[in-house]
Image: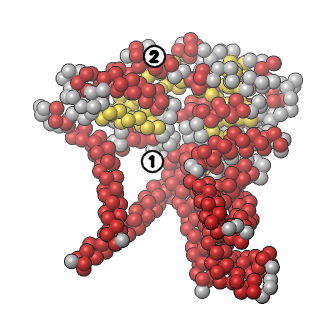
Amino acid sequence: MKKFNVLGIFLILLMVLAGCSTEKPAAAEPNAAPAETPVVEEPKEDEFNPQILFNGSSTLAPVMASISTNFIEGNVTWDKVDASFPEKNIAIYVSAGGSGQGVKSVIDQTSDFGMVARTVKDTEKEQLPELKEFKVGIDALTLGVNPNNPVLTVKNNLTKDEIIKIFSGEFKTWKDLDASLPDKEIIVVTRDIGGGAHEVFQSKVMGDVQVKADAIQAPSMGALVTKIIENEYAIGYASFGVVNQNIGKVTTLSVDGVEASEENIINGSYIIQRPLIAIFNGELTAPQQAFMDYVMSEEGLAVVESMGFVPVK
Amino acid sequence: MKEYKEKIFKSLITIGAILSSILVLLVFFYILKESIPFFREVQIKEYLFGDTWSPLGTEKYSFLPMILATLYVSFLAIFIATPLGVGCALFLSFHVNKKYTKILLSFIDMIAGIPSVIFGFVGLIILVKFLENNLNMATGESVLAGGMLLAVMLFPYIVTGCTETFEKGKMKYYTASLSLGVSKWYTMRKVMLPFGANSIFVNMLLAFSRAMGETMAVMMVTGNSPIFPRLLGRAETIPSLIALEMGTSTYKSIHYSSLYAAGLILIIIILIIQFIAHKINKIGSR
C-alpha cells in the first residue's frame, strides 16, 4: 500500500513537471526571436521555429484558426511551403481573449501576432516601436432587430439621432420612437463596454453620449445575436458577419439611409465599421512571412469572406 | 533502507506543501500588485460608495452595484438551495435504504461535475425564456434567474455536506432516540436538526463563497448591467465584470487595474466568509 502512495506522489510530481515543461517553450520562444537579430550571419536552420502563436480578438480568432487549418492541412511540413525550410511540422496556435489582450500579448511577447478588431491606439503604439499591421478585412456593425419587431412595419431606417436616443435610454419604449408602435420596453443589447465592438459603436455613433447602464451586456457576438433572435423587442449592434450567418432570423436597419451592404462598407459610406488587423512587433521571420503571405492571398481572403466579413482586396 | 525511503517521501510531500502555499500567495500578491495603481488613483469614497460604473465614458469606478449584485444573487441562491438541500439530506439519511443512498448521492454529486457553461446555456434558453413568458418581464435576464440557476448548482454541495453530518448524528443518537419510543419525524426535527445546525450553517457559508465566485453561468443569465440590483432587474456580479472586461481593457490602464481591484475585493469578502465558517466549525466541534 505504501509503495502505491510513493508511486502516486511520483506520478503527481511528474505531471507537475510535465506541466512546467510544456509551458516553458511557449514563454521562452518569443524571447528567442529578438535574440536572433544581433547574430546576423549565423545559419538560421538551427533556430528555425516551426511555431506561430496568435492571440487576441474573439471576432478575428475563428477566421485565423480556419485559415491556419487550411494552411497546415495543405502543407503539413514547412519544407512544402518553401524548399529552403527544414522538414518540420507546421504548428500555428490561435487563441481568443479580446483585442486588448491581443495587443498585450505582443507587448509581453507571449504570442507572435496579436489580433485586433479596432484601430491600434496611440498609447499602445508607444509600447510597440516596430509595429506592423496586416489588415485582413473589415467587420461592420449592423443594427439588428428581431424580424417580428413591430418597428419594421413602420420604418427600415434609423437616423443617427434616433439610434443615440434608443441606446442612451432617452427612448424607453418603442412607442417613444414612433407613436404607432406598442408601449413595450426597448431591450438594448450591447457587447462588453470595454470591448472592440463597443468602442467602434461609441466613436462612430454615440460620440460623448453614454449607453444606458441597464443595457444587457452580452459576453459574445453570438450571445448578442441569440438575444435578438429570442426577444421580439430587442435591438443591438450585431456583427455583419454573424448576421450573415443568421439570415432570416435577424433583420438589419439602415443607418441614415445607408444600407449595411458589402458595397457600402467597402466604400466607407456605411459608417459603423471596424478593421480586422493582425499586428506584429519587429521583423518577421521567413516562416511567419510565408504564413502572412498566405493569409493575404486569394485563398486566405476567401475564408475571410466565407466567415461573413468583408475582405480588403 | 526503510528510513531512507521515508525521508524521500517526507521531503517530497514537504516540497508539495510549500509549492502549493507559495502558489496561493503568489496569486494573491500579483493581484494586489496589479491593483495598486487603481487604489492610488481612485478614492475609497468613490469605489465603495459611488453609484456608477463607467470606466471608459465618464471614468467613474464604483464597485458598489457589483458587490451588492454578487451578494444578492448568492444570498438568493443559498436561500433557495438550503431548505431543499437539507430536506434532501434528511430524506437520504433516514428514509432510504443505505444501498440506494449511495447511488442517489453519486447522482447528486454528478450535478457538481456539470460544467457551468452548460448550466448557463440551459438557463439562457429555458429559465430566462420561462421568466419572460410567465412573469410578464420585458426580458428574463435578472437576479432571480441567476439565483435560481445558482441554487441548482449549489444543491449538491449542501446535500453532500449535510448527509455526512446526519449520518454521524444517526450513529450517535438514532438508536437511543428510537428506544425511547420517539417517532422518526420527531427525531429528525428535534434531535437531528439541532445537532446538525452548526454544520448546516458552515455548509451554507462555504456554498455561499462558491456562489460568489461563479462566473460563466451567472454571466449568461443576469444581463450584466452595472446598476443596483433588483429581484426582477438586471445585475452584474464581480466575476462577470472581470470576465467581460478583462480581455478588452487596455493593458496597464486604470480600467485594467480596477478589474484586479474588483478581484481583490471579491477575494477579501470570500476570505472573511471562510474565516467565519472556520471559527464556527471550531466552536461546533468542541
How many labels, in total?
Answer: 2
Which amino acid lies under the numbered mark 2 shown in the image of this protein? Ala
For the N terminus of chain A, give its image quadrant: bottom left
Cα gap from disc 1 to disc 2, whole angstroms: 37 Å
Residue occupying the point 21% across, 28% down = A87
From the top left corner, tell me how far across and down residue A253 is, in percent. 70, 20
Q: Nearer the viewer, mark 1 or mark 2?
A: 2
Residue occupying the point 16% across, 36% down = A46
SS state under label 1: loop
Which amino acid lies under the numbered mark 1 shown in the image of this protein? Lys
Q: Is residue A31 left or right of residue B37?
A: left
From the top left corner, tell me how far across and down residue B101 is, in percent. 65, 65
- Residue A292 occupies quadrant: top left
For the C terminus of chain A, give its image quadrant: top left
From the top left corner, tell me how far across and down residue A116 is, in percent. 46, 32
Q: Chain of mark 2?
A: A
Q: Chain of mark 1?
A: B
SS state under label 2: helix
- Would you place residue A36 above or below residue B268 in this image? above
The colour scheme applied to this rendered structure is secondary structure
Residue occupying the point 65% across, 31% down = A225
Residue occupying the point 83% across, 34% down = A184
Q: Which mark is residue B252?
A: 1
Within-10-Å neighbours for mark 1: few <14, some 14–19, many 20+: few
Q: Which mark is residue B172?
A: none
Q: Which residue matches tag 2?
A: A302
Residues at marks 1 and 2 on the same chain = no
- Would you place residue B146 above or below residue A256 in this image? below
From the top left corner, tell me how far across and down residue A259 is, in percent. 65, 15
